[in-house]
Amino acid sequence: MTLPLRLVTSAVALAILLNGCRPEPREAVIGLALQPADRNIGAARLAESTLADEAGPGDISIRLVLDTTIRDRDAESELLRARSMLALPALAGVVGHSSSRGALAAAPFYDSAGVPVLTAIATSRLLRQSGPAVFQLPPDDSVQGAFIGRFVHEGLHAFSAAVLYQNDEYGMGLRDGILAALRGRGVVVTQSMPFSIRSDLDVLTRAALAGQRLDVLIVAGRADQVADVATAARDVAPRAAVVAGDAPEWPELVAQVEPVVLSRLYLTSLWLYPPGDSLADDFVTRFRQASHREPEPYDALTYDAVMLLGRGIREVGPSPRRLMRWLRSAGTEHPAIRLVTGEFPPSGPRDAHLRMTQWRDGAAVLAWPR
Amino acid sequence: MKASRSGLTLHALVLMGVATIVVYFIGFAVFLTFRVTPQAIGLPRRTAPVLVFFEQLSQRNALIESSMLVARQAIADGSVGRMDSLARAIADKDLQRSLFLSDVPLNLRSTMANSERLEGEIETQLVEIAALMALRRLDEARARMRAVDSLHSDFANEVVSSEREGFAEMNDMQMELADAVGSTISAMLAWVALGALLVLITTGIVRRRAARPLAELDRALTAVAEGDLNVRIPVLYDDEMGELSAHFNVMTEVLRARAEEQGRFAAAGQLIAGIAHEVNNPLMAIAAVARTRLDAGDLDQEVEAELRQIRRQAQRAGRLLSGLLRFVRSDPGTAAVTDINQVVDAAVDLVSYRFGVDEIVLELALEPNLPVVAGSPARLEQVFVNLISNATDAMIHAPRPRILEIATWERGGVVGASVSDRGGGVAEDMKARLFLPFATTKGTEGTGLGLYISRQVVRDAGGDLAYRDLGKGSCFEVRLPVLTAAAPAKPPAMPGRSPLAKPLDGLHILLVDDELAVRSPIARFLRRRGADVTEAADGLVALEMIRQHPPAVIVADLRMPRMDGVELCARIAQDFPALADRIVILSGDLSQLGGQLPVPAHLVLAKPVELDEIERAILEVGERLQA
């Protein structure tokens, strides 16, 4: 081989070697695709702090970044939020978005970029079909809907029910699960009505309950919508129970609904603090200290989402593609990861951690299953 | 000749060339695939979801409009049931959202989400209208209808906006494809230019590394075929062609050396033949004088013995010279009836001078009455000379006794002759190459052709030459088929002396020879035998004598000044045709006749010739005369 050819070959080999030996960056960023006003941001920061405490010498340092300039929740804002996340340097993964609609709208962005996004709150079952980059922590609305249907039949022993649902991915997803569960158990569904944030829920509720002997009124909506429906139902069907999905939070409802209405209200909870679980105990203790309130399910889920990504980064490094592969292979190529709200991926029934709660004595208590 | 440059081997160059071609075409295909195909495939793939989205929007718009129409009519009619049916239809609608079309371009997704939000709002408003109508609150229902109209207007604007953005997106995709095609064409031209450059480079390399060296080789081979062994090929590169060139140069060098050697041999042969020819006359004179004196009788016993010794040694010298002449002259290899025993004897005579010096003990075991074979005696004699010489060489350093065994036999229709020595044998690595050309153990002193030619000669005669390892020594065996066809009789034996005291009585013989030392004793012998002999020193004198007094028989030498034997024969045939068949030719070098014998072959006698043989030939001519 002539000398020039040798030199060229050696240079190419050296370049390849150097590229392979290039040291990995020692910092990783987890994006928070949440609204600045979201209450679960505190849980995310708590997770960031926990990861920092757990870090050993040489471990990659993990930082959370939230874009506080985008404040709205509409589709366009969610897309902007996604673009903002993807522009972050050293981005390894994203936790968010706040809603199923936002997560669905933004999913193609993450797929194109090859960045994993972990949804802590969005429950639309369509997220599972939205691309390989989207990972869902809580059980989806079809599981929740079936759980609610089971509760209505087995817990409340209802014969008839009406369903009011928000006319979006969340509401319609719950509706489908609920209707399938109810019809499968022989519960008569008297009404199935969509509503929007502008709807007059008093009208819709009265119309739904007019002339009906109703055992249960199921509401798939947010807190204020549940409050409006429950309040309207008190007048028309005072004996009917009102069952809601996971979207509303007890503190919000407590502030809006009268105690008498509250007593007939059931909320689906994605997680209920089980004392005795070491991880949960540690989380709850630290959360109380940091936030001065009890953690809600979305707090625990958001905390778990950040911790999950953090542990993945510590194991496989800050590369988004490697992190995505690690998440996909959890439970097969490496063990499932134990979290506050359960395992990832879940090994048992998908609704194993779902709880139906009621408000008693100033706190949310387990109503079903006992 | 060392290569002027080291470089890649041709093999490596070919591999690189093939690899370059493969990479070029694969690269071309990959380039096209990745340059144009994504856009070409992407265009329909990316536009399809947009078109589906538009179609769905259009369908939803139509559905909304029809729903609104139903709602207006229901409100106008106060038809609660119809409204209720509409509400149920809306409520039962499946969760179908364009938002879930993941292939919709990213810039359309915002518009898509807004339009779907508005659609949802319209639907829920219609459901509310149904609820209000169920509650008999028609005025509120009508008011809601106006809100629905406003929402529908927003929806329609979103649809228009979606379409505008969608068509802009598709236009952008088409532009991308057009740009890709355009830049691909430019890149293709560059790629083609690169290909042309590669072709030029490859052509140059092929020409420099293969075509030119091959042309040189062809030129050199042609020159060698035309006889020029001095041609050399320059060794330019240290590759296969360079090796070939180097081998060619070595080959021509070897051939040149061999040719020079052959030339020296040929020249030596010519010289030897010339010398032998010149020595033949004095030898014949010595033998003839001795014979003449012995025939005269009345000699002292001692003198007689010495004369006989002189005659014997002269005859022996003559036989040696004859054998030498036969050996060095090229023989066309005409097959003749051959007695192998005689051939072996002649070969031994030629080589026997070495036996004393090298202390070789010869053991001959020649089978008597050996059947004849067909072959060239001269060439077969060369074979045995070669075998005996090799055997002698093999025993030079062998311990004594150095026994050389030569045997002949006949078995099963095959005549065999073996030459065996007690030397060191043939080395293992030489055995396989023994009969190949240029295989020699004698370094530069040997041509390496002896055994190769010997075997060829024997095979030409229908037999074969084989080697047998004796363990301590070697044995070479010649096998030839017995000549069983109607063959001429064996060569006539040497004529004995005529029983008559003067068998040539009364015969007028003209003796023509320029050498007095040869002519005188022959003349005296012939006179003693009763012939009337006249002598001439050359052809011209002989012609004159013939004119004056035609002889009965003419005995003439071949090489004479002024007019040699061939010209004399021609002149006699022309001027004295009756005498044309009465000529006996004496010649020291028959090869000079070139196969064109002026007289019948049995009347051509090779010097040194016995006087009795001259008498026999003359008697034969005389008998024909009488007949």
Image: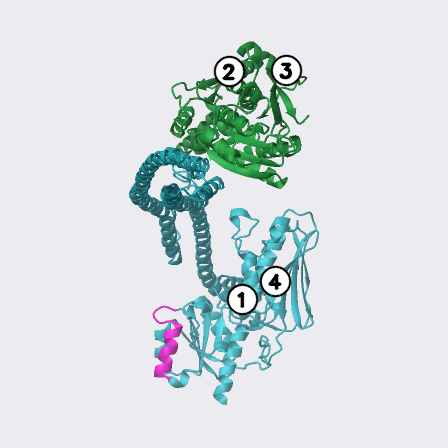
Chain colours: A green, B cyan
Q: Residues within 10 Å of mark 4 (few under 14, many from 20)?
A: many
Q: For the residue labelled by badge 3, is the local secondary structure a helix, a strand or a loop? A: helix
Q: CA distance from mark 2 to mark 1?
A: 121 Å
Tag 4 subunit: B
Tag 1 subunit: B
Identify residue for label 3: A281
* Occupied quadrant, residue B165: top left
The answer to whether marks 3 and 1 mark residues whose Cβ atoms lie closer than 8 Å is no
In magenta, the rendered stretch is B560-576
Q: Nearer the viewer, residue A285 or B626?
A: A285
Q: CA distance from mark 3 to mark 2?
A: 17 Å
Q: Are marks 2 and 1 on the same chain?
A: no
Amino acid type, mark 4: Leu
Q: Which is more foreground, mark 4 or mark 1?
A: 4
Identify residue for label 4: B465
Q: Is residue A23 above or below residue A210?
A: above
Q: Which is more foreground, mark 3 or mark 4?
A: 3
Q: CA distance from mark 2 to mark 4?
A: 109 Å
Identify residue for label 2: A42
* Occupied quadrant, residue B533: bottom left
Amino acid type, mark 1: Ala
Q: Is residue A33 above or below residue B384?
A: above
Q: Are marks 4 and 1 on the same chain?
A: yes
Note whether residue B408 is visible: yes
Q: Is residue A336 above or below residue B38?
A: above
Amino acid type, mark 3: Asp
Q: Which is more foreground, mark 3 or mark 1?
A: 3
Main secondary structure of the magenta stretch: helix
